[in-house]
């Protein structure tokens, strides 16, 4: 047996490799399950991951801890996707690209947005989105300083609106109130309304 | 003693009167406490109502049940206030009045909006707002039919946006991200962005 041949250190390494493999399988399965059903249970997730409930609870002490881990990984991917969005050039075009990419990355995770809002505390949601917020604030502040975006409302509110409306659109698609195709337009119209300077016509969404 | 003189029927009546008085005091106290602190505990609410915890739990079996009762009463008041908003005449002016009144009635309840979103299930929130939604849908549909509002997005989404952005503004005011004075402008810009027909300039908020 491998564990006998390689001794206790090797056994420990094997155990850690198994644990890592299980954790990865659980997070993958949870991401898939929650994308389809925001109320997916621990039993369903364990089954989809091919592990037992005891193994799952050995790694994640509660459903909320698991949802938080799934959200953390999703946000890391979101930061990577949104970090690649070109925010230079015409600020209104850049805002359209930011909204479209924000929607695209949200849509990829389906109902996970709904699961996160039901499960995580407000401060956990804020912490998970901190990286995305900082980048959006920097972009909007440049556009405000140059007179492209209205600056008579707090920039933090404008970013909150982008976040809130994107999540509301994801929930509306989950509920069948909005189609996924209409979602980018639905988000863009609201965000452009809240950023276009007073008196200027809102650009076409 | 009154109860002896009036017999069992009178005693029952007295008991019911006391219960009604306690329930009213508890709902009043919970409304005040939750408006200030969305995490206000049952103990704090019982103390503010001048009743014991046992009495409170005799009427409301959980904090969630109490929050639901407070929300139901608040929504009844909201329906009465918003039902008085004149939605005739120029639809854009009427939309401004509807947004302003929606904000005003939300602001009156302070952090209760935050407490409700943390405590109630999604379907409870939807049910609580059904009356308000129906009226807003009717108003927006008339404006869409007359070409005043964009009709390339679902009317249900436009109402969801009004609801979501109003609640987000209430939360932002609670968090200190937005001032109460700026909130009507913050909501109106987003809602006008989502309702103004494509190509038309968004009216001044």
Image (cartoon, coloured by chain):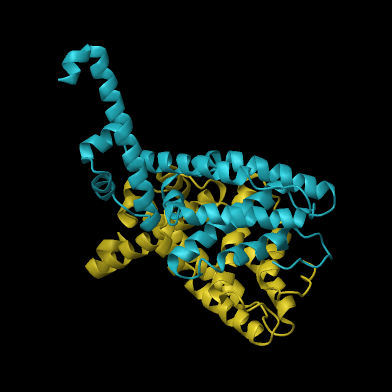
Chain colours: A yellow, B cyan
Q: Residue at 73% of width from left, 77% of height from top?
A: A92
Find residue A101 and report its image quarter: bottom right
Q: Where does residue B98 sit, x and y in percent of width and height? A: 65, 52
In the rendered image, the quadrant that contains the N terminus of chain B is top left
Q: Is residue A129 above or below residue B14?
A: below
Along the line of sight, the residue nearer the viewer: B165 or B4: B4
Along the line of sight, the residue nearer the viewer: B92 or B5: B5
Q: Residue at 71% of width from left, 61% of height from top?
A: B192
Q: Where does residue A18 sit, x and y in percent of width and height? A: 36, 60
Q: How many marks?
A: 0
Q: Is residue B24 left or right of residue B167?
A: left
Q: Where does residue B193 sit, x and y in percent of width and height? A: 72, 63
Q: Is residue A147 left or right of residue A125?
A: right
Along the line of sight, the residue nearer the viewer: A21 or B5: B5
Q: Residue furthest bottom?
A: A146
Mark yes or no: residue A139 visible: yes
Along the line of sight, the residue nearer the viewer: A172 or A152: A152
Q: Residue furthest left?
A: B1
Mark yes or no: residue A181 visible: no
Q: Is residue B88 above or below residue A194?
A: above
In the rendered image, the quadrant that contains the C terminus of chain B is bottom right
Q: Is residue A76 left or right of residue B19?
A: right
Q: Residue at 22% of width from left, 40% of height from top?
A: B53
Q: Residue at 51% of width from left, 67% of height from top?
A: A75
Q: Where does residue A86 sit, x and y in percent of width and height? A: 68, 80
């Amino acid at each position: 047996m491998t564990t006998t041949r390689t001794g206790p250190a090797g056994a420990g390494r094997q155990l850690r490799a198994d644990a890592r493999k299980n954790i990865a399988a659980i997070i993958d399965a949870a991401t898939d399950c929650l994308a389809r059903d925001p109320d997916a249970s621990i039993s369903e997730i364990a089954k989809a991951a091919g592990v037992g409930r005891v193994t799952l609870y050995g790694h994640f002490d509660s459903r909320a801890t698991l949802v938080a881990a799934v959200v953390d990984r999703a946000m890391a991917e979101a930061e990577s996707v949104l970090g690649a969005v070109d925010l230079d050039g015409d600020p209104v075009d850049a805002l359209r690209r930011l909204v479209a990419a924000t929607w695209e990355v949200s849509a990829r995770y389906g109902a996970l947005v709904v699961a996160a809002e039901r499960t995580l505390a407000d401060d956990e949601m804020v912490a998970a989105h901190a990286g995305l917020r900082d980048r959006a604030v920097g972009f909007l502040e440049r556009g405000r300083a140059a007179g492209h975006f209205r600056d008579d409302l707090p920039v933090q509110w404008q970013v909150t609106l982008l976040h809130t409306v994107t999540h509301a659109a994801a929930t509306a698609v989950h509920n069948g109130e909005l189609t996924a195709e209409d979602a980018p337009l639905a988000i863009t119209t609201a965000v452009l309304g809240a950023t276009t300077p007073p008196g200027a016509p809102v650009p076409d969404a």
